[in-house]
């Protein structure tokens, strides 16, 4: 897939809620059709073998897809979406102490109700850890997101 950060992706401060808050990842950069997140792997996210749990990797891949497609330039609301199908490939193990970069890129669609997105996770050395591809459906309505702040006000203007 080789997802690259677009030049116009803007640094943001975004606070997750619920289950995603427990995982502890953060949004680094965001724009329509793209998101970059980061996770510092902690012991409580690992399985009995000391490897990052596959469920955490799948959560990161799925979450990056949702964020990439629901971005709104005014940062006051996000579209609602749900996952219809998702495929994951585990390439290499991640361990406690690793720092992961999660990249999601939305593929434009002619459909107004469904979309596809691809995601990648790399470790701090740039090695590919996992990939994902999914199909998603937009739902009616929007949700308020008062927790998103652009960090570079000059870029946001």
Image (tube, rainbow, N blue to C red):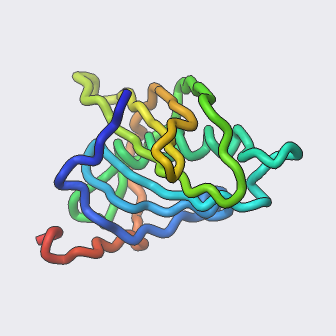
Apparent side of residue 149 relative to residue 90 in the rendered image (left or right): left
Residue 98 percent location from the top left of the image = 62, 55
Apparent side of residue 131 relative to residue 10 in the rendered image (left or right): right
In this view of the protein, which residue sits in the foreground, 15 or 49? 49
**Whether residue 154 is situated above or below residue 31 in the rendered picture:** below
In this view of the protein, which residue sits in the foreground, 30 or 3? 3
Which residue sits at x=17%, y=55%?
8
In this view of the protein, which residue sits in the foreground, 136 or 57? 57
Which residue sits at x=44%, y=36%?
119
Residue 130 percent location from the top left of the image = 56, 34
Which residue sits at x=22%, y=59%?
73
Residue lying at the far right of the rendered structure: 48
Quadrant in the rendering for residue 140: top left
Residue 63 percent location from the top left of the image = 51, 46
Which residue sits at x=41%, y=44%?
103
**Whether residue 108 is situated above or below residue 150 in the rendered picture:** above
Rendered-image quadrant of the N terminus:
top left
Apparent side of residue 114 relative to residue 130 in the rendered image (left or right): left
Quadrant in the rendering for residue 11: bottom left
**Whether residue 154 is situated above or below residue 90 in the rendered picture:** below
Rendered-image quadrant of the C terminus:
bottom left
Quadrant in the rendering for residue 29: bottom left
């Amino acid at each position: 897939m080789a997802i690259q950060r677009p030049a116009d992706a803007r640094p943001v401060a975004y606070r997750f809620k619920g289950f995603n808050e427990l995982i502890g990842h953060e949004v680094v950069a965001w724009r329509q059709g793209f998101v970059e997140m980061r996770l510092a792997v902690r012991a409580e996210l690992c399985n009995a073998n000391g490897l990052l749990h596959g469920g955490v990797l799948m959560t990161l891949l799925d979450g990056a897809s949702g964020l990439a497609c629901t971005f709104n330039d005014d940062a006051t609301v996000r579209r609602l979406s749900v996952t219809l199908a998702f495929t994951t490939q585990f390439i290499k193990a991640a361990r406690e102490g690793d720092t992961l970069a999660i990249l999601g890129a939305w593929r434009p669609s002619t459909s107004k109700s469904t979309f596809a997105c691809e995601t990648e996770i790399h470790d701090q050395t740039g090695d590919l850890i996992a990939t994902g591809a999914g199909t998603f459906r937009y739902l009616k309505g929007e949700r308020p997101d008062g927790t998103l702040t652009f960090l570079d006000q000059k870029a946001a203007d």
